[in-house]
Amino acid sequence: MGPLRPLGIPVLLDRVLQARGLSFNEDKTSIVSLDQGFDFLGFTIRRFTTPRGGKLLIKPSAQ
C-alpha cells in the first residue's frame, strides 16, 4: 500500500470512526503537513528539517 493521498484520508477516517459509532466534523477537521504545524489539545506540534534529518517539536501552545 502506497502513501495515502490527502483526498482519500477523510474517507478512510470516516470509515474507521463509523465502525466505532463516531464521526468527525468536516468543518473543524483539516489535514495539514507537519512542516506547517498544528495546535492540538493545548500543544503546538511541528516538524523542522535540519541538515542531519529532522526534528519534531512539541511545545505548549502560546495561548
Image: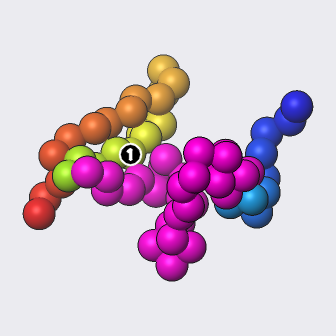
The span shown in magenta is: 12-41
Overall secondary structure of the magenta section: loop
- Residue 37 in the magenta stretch? The answer is yes
Say if 30 sits above or below 51 in the image. below
Q: Is residue 17 left or right of residue 39?
A: right
Foreground of the two, 50 or 56: 56
Residue 43 rendering spot, x and y as whole percentages: 23, 48
Q: From this viewpoint, which residue is outermost toward the front?
A: 21
Local secondary structure at mark 1: strand
Q: Is residue 14 left or right of residue 54?
A: right
Residue 63 rendering spot, x and y as whole percentages: 11, 63
Q: Residue at x 51, y 78 (%)?
A: 27
- Residue 38 in the magenta stretch? The answer is yes
Q: Quadrant of residue 45?
A: top left
Amino acid identity at mark 1:
Arg
Residue 17 rendering spot, x and y as whole percentages: 60, 50
Q: Residue at x 47, y 37 (%)?
A: 49
Foreground of the two, 20 or 54: 20
Q: Quadrant of residue 39?
A: bottom left
Q: Count the marks.
A: 1
Q: Identify the residue under disc 1.
A: 46
Residue 23 rendering spot, x and y as whole percentages: 56, 61
Q: Residue at x 79, y 39 (%)?
A: 3
Q: From this viewpoint, which residue is outermost toward the bottom?
A: 27
